Amino acid sequence: METVWLNPRERSVLPDPVVSDTEVGRVEAFYRSRPKLKPTPLHRIRGVAEELALGEVLLKDESNRFGLNAFKILGVLYAFHRIMEARSSGGTPIVACASAGNHGRAVARAAREFGFAAKVYLPAGTVPARVEDITGEGADVVVTDFGYEGSVRQVARDAEREGWLIVSDTSWPGYNEVPRWIMAGYTWMLTEAQAQWAPLPVPDAVIIQGGVGGLVCAGASWFAQRYGANRPFFIAAEPTAAPCLLESARIGRPAVVQEQDTMMTCLRCAEISPVIWPVLTHAVDAVVTVDDERAAWAMRRLARPSAGDPEVVAGASGACGLGALQAIMCHDAFRSVRDRASLGPRSSILVVNTEGATDPALYRSVVGD
C-alpha cells in the first residue's frame, strides 16, 4: 500500500544542515578544479509536464555520471579526496564497503584511480551484472548471506579485524565522517543543476529518492541553506516495500523496517543512515512511498518519450522519483502532497534519474528490446 507523510513542522532555518556550507564550498573547489569531469544533463521533459498538467518537469540525468551509470561516484570521489588529505604518510590500506551495487562500483572505480585495493560486500541475491561491473573495476567482491544491512555489519566486523579502511555511504555510532563527506560530494549535482535551470527560477518542488537517505539529506541540506524558508517543497520518495524514511519520520525516530522484494533494488534499505536524521525532520516536507508499477511507468515513459523529449535510460531505482511525481499528480492517495505543495499548471518540478540500466535483464523485461 502506497503511503504519505507530511511534515507537521513550520518551515524554518535548518538547525543542523549535516553538510555545512564550508564543506559544500570545498566540494565546489574540488570539482571546479577538474573540468574534464563533465556535468550530466538537465533535461526539460515537456511531454511529461503536459501529461501531468504541470508547467515544467526538469530531469537531472545521472545515468552516465563520469562514465559510470549512477550518481554515487560524485560522493565517493570527493570522499577519497578528503581521505587522502587527512591521511598521514605511509602505506595505502585496502578500502572496503557494503553496497547494493552502485556505491560499490563507485568505490571500486575510485580505489583504482587513487591506487587502493578494494573489497566490496554485496547482499545475497545480487544480480550477476552488478557483480561483474564491480569486479570489472578491479575490486574483490564478496556476496554475503545477508541483506544490505547485514552486509554493512559484516564488512564493519571484517574491516576492524583486518585493518581495512571503510568507505561507507551509511553511518553508525562512531562512524559518520566519511558518510558526511560522501553526502557533501552529492551536492555538486545540485550546483550543476542550478546553473543549468537558469534563467528559470528555482523549481517549486524537488523529488529525490531515498534508500538510506544520503542523497535526500544532501539535497534537502543544499536547498535549505541556499533558499531558507523559501526553498522548494522537498519530497523524498522510496519503495513501498522498504519505507525506512517514511516510518522513521512517522514515529519520530530512526526506525528499522522489514523490507520486501522490489525491483528498486538500490533503494531496498531497512534502516536510514542515522546521521541524516536532523535533515529528515527539519528540511524534508513530505515522504511518499511508491510501488514497482510507478517505477516501471517512469522507465517506459523515459525510454519511449513524446516527440521532442530526450530518450533517457533509467533503472528502476533511478525512475523512482519520476514515478512518485506521476503518482502525486494523478492519484487521490497522494492528493495531500499535491495540495500542500500547491502543484499545478504553473509549477516547475525537479526530479533525478539516479541510475541507468544497472540490471540490463530487468530493464529489458520492463521496457522491451
Image: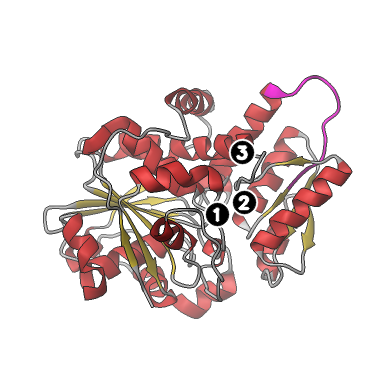
Label placed on residue 176:
3
Residue at 45% across / 37% down in the picture? 187
Mark 1 lies on residue: 69
Distance between the alpha carbons at the discs numbered 2 and 3? 16 Å
Q: Nearer the viewer, mark 1 or mark 2?
A: 2
Q: Are marks 2 and 3 in contact (CB under 8 Å)?
A: no
The majority secondary structure of the magenta stretch comes to: loop
Q: Is residue 254 left or right of residue 338?
A: right
Q: Is residue 89 magenta?
A: yes
User: SS at mark 2?
Assistant: helix
- Identity of the amino acid at label 3? Asn
User: SS at mark 1?
Assistant: loop
Per the rendered image, the range of residues in magenta is 86-96
Q: Nearer the viewer, mark 2 or mark 3?
A: 3
- Identity of the amino acid at label 2? His
Q: Nearer the viewer, residue 187 or 220?
A: 220
User: SS at mark 3?
Assistant: loop
Mark 2 lies on residue: 103
Badge 2 density bin: few <14, some 14–19, many ≥20, Cα 10 Å: many
Q: Earlier in the sequence, mark 1 or mark 2?
A: 1
Q: Is residue 178 left or right of residue 280?
A: right
Q: Earlier in the sequence, mark 2 or mark 3?
A: 2
Residue at 49% across / 61% down in the picture? 244
- Give the quadrant of residue 53: bottom left
